[in-house]
Amino acid sequence: MRQVNFVQEINVLGLDLKATGIYIPGDPGKYSGPPENCYPSEPPEVTVHTLVYQDEQQNYNMMPLLESDVGEEICDKCIEAVAEWLCNEH
C-alpha cells in the first residue's frame, strides 16, 4: 500500500493543532469472485510524528495527548483530514 506523508490542521479539545505523520489508506477488500481471490477490508491507518499547538509566542508539544483519552480522536481526525485532502487533490 502506498503511504502518504501529511501535514494537517485538526481541532481537538477546542485547540487548533498541527499534526504531521504518515497515512496509509485502507483497503475495501474483495468479497466476490473465487474464494482464493477474496480478502477482508482493512481500515486506514495513521502514525502521528508531531503534534503541536502554536500560540503567538511559542510552540507546545502536544504528543502526550496521543496517550490520553483523546488519542483515538486525534488519530481519527487526522485520518478524516488526510482522506478529505486526498479527495480534493484528485
Image (cartoon, rainbow, N blue to C red):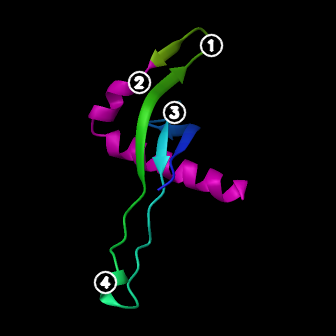
- Which label sits on residue 62? 2
Between marks 1 and 3 in the image, the one whose residue lies nearer the viewer: 3
Q: Are marks 1 and 3 in contact (CB under 8 Å)?
A: no
SS at mark 1 in the image: loop
Q: CA distance from mark 4 to mark 3?
A: 38 Å
Q: What is the crowding at mark 3: few (fewer than 14 residues within 10 Å), some, or many (at least 20)?
A: some
Q: Which amino acid type corresponds to the residue marked 2 in the rendered image? A: Met
Q: What is the crowding at mark 4: few (fewer than 14 residues within 10 Å), some, or many (at least 20)?
A: few
SS at mark 4 in the image: helix
The magenta segment is 61-90
The mark nearer the N terminus, 4 or 1, is 4
SS at mark 3 in the image: strand
The mark nearer the N terminus, 1 or 3, is 3
Residue beneath the point at 64% across and 51% down: 85
- Which label sits on residue 20? 3
The mark nearer the N terminus, 2 or 4, is 4
Between marks 4 and 3 in the image, the one whose residue lies nearer the viewer: 4
Q: Which amino acid type corresponds to the residue marked 4 in the rendered image? A: Glu
Residue beneath the point at 27% across and 33% down: 67
Residue 56: in magenta span: no
SS at mark 2 in the image: loop
Q: CA distance from mark 2 to mark 3?
A: 12 Å
Q: Is residue 36 above or below residue 20?
A: below
Taking depth in this image into account, of 74 and 29 the one nearest to the observer is 29
Residue pointed to by mark 4: 36
The mark nearer the N terminus, 2 or 3, is 3
Residue pointed to by mark 1: 56
Residue 69: x, y in percent? Answer: 27, 39
Residue 16: x, y in percent? Answer: 55, 32
Q: Which amino acid type corresponds to the residue marked 3 in the rendered image? A: Thr
Q: CA distance from mark 2 to mark 4?
A: 45 Å
